[in-house]
Amino acid sequence: MSLKHSRIPLGRADALASQVIREAHQAGLPTDDIVPAGGLRRFAPAVEGTLLVAVADDTRRDEVLAGMSRLSIVRAVLGSATSSLRVSTDRGLLEVHVTPPQMAGAALVWHTGTPRHVKWLQTRASARGLTFTGGRLERHRSGLTVPDEETFYRLLDLPYISPELREGEDEIAAAEHDALPSLINALHIRGDLHMHSTWSDGRDSILHMALSARQLGYEYVAITDHSERSWASRKLLAVEIPLQREEIETARSQAPGIDILHGVEVDIMPDGSLDFDDNTLSRFDIVLASLHDAAGDHSARLTERYLRAMRHPLVNIITHPANRSPALSNGYELDFARLFEAAVDSGTAMEIDGAPGHLDMDGRVARDAAAAGVTIVVNSDCHRAEALGRQMSFGIGTARRGWIGPDSVLNTRGIEGIRKFIARKRGRSSR
Ligand SMILES: [Zn+2]
Ligand SMILES: [Zn+2]
């Protein structure tokens, strides 16, 4: 059974998995737990089919599989085996594997890592007289007790490896030398510096966004609507900025307990200048600059446009640098080494954007950025209040895929740290 050749964006796989899990709980399927696996759990930007691991003991296995096949989202059963099921659904193909609780750790490892990661573990298992196959870890053909993944890795004399790192690449050597990075997590995030309101293409008001962010425990947000020549379906006009500022003031008084920064996501023009003039930009609390052009423009020119924007004293963050679209386009081919150098020199942060249509910077690029000393920011780029948390979790997962720790990330700092970061660049230019 395989779901290969059906790559779908992470966001779609996540939506499908969430709906199946919700329906399964509503239907009262007798499982201890249902956990996403595969690329979805690794936060791969595009995943080869959606995979779930359901934990239920053997006596309930058939009932779980039968119940899964009857969920209202399921259109047709495409295949089944003793402990698994493959179905088509309204939202794409889905594979479900049932594991008994005492083997859940081995099953999750088996169904989460890339083939290279799993192969490495198989080799390591056999060197210890164990067999790791089909989601089971055995010694002399009898199953070991592996209730969780920590136990699994421990049995192979390894530290726990986070799902986002299980690509079958450098994490292998890092794990063998006990040199795995300590990764950022949701608790480190103190605010979100990129989101849209009804002043551009967002669906919800500034107040609604701020209240939802406060509910997530954030200390601050930046409202960053699109500038007037951007490609967004609706944009913030220069003449509207004073009115938006008034609405921000009102929202500040109606949402105590969270700082609301008046920001903007300004487009970088073909010559590298910005869509609002300096006088206009200087009145925003924070400025994000971005390219939304389709890929295809000469990469050297795109790099130059970013470099010019970074040198601008009012630009604080470059958003979704590659402007890619998972499963559709890899985005721009940029000279990232030059961008990282300029970001560090100019005091400009670079973004990991959690919108499922971006997930950018990702993987090796994000890792190289942090290694070069670039200040990273993890944002939701959210257009709907209800999705603030979800998109931030995609951003965090993407950052973890880039081996990013909390110290590299701007929005793990408090509001004073954010203000200092902005003031430092502005002050530098006025000296
Ligand atoms: Zn954007
Ligand atoms: Zn945006």
Image (tube, rainbow, N blue to C red):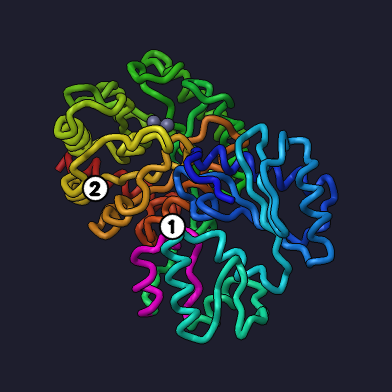
* Kind of residue sitting beneath label 2: Gly
Q: Is residue 78 something one can see in this rendering?
A: yes
Label 2 sits on a secondary structure element that is loop
> Does 348 sit left or right of 73 as displayed?
left
> Mark 1 highlights which residue?
400
* Dots 1, 2 in contact, CB < 8 A: no
> Does 358 sit left or right of 336 as displayed?
right
Q: Position of residue 375 (x, y in %)?
A: 31, 52
* Magenta stretch in the rendered image: 158-177
- Total numbered labels: 2
The answer to which of marks 1 and 2 sits earlier in the sequence is 2
From what the image shows, is residue 422 above or below residue 122? above
Label 1 sits on a secondary structure element that is helix
Which image quarter: residue 55? bottom right
Q: Residue at horizontal 33%, vertical 16%? A: 229
> Mark 2 highlights which residue?
347
* Cβ at disc 2 under 8 Å from ligand 1: no
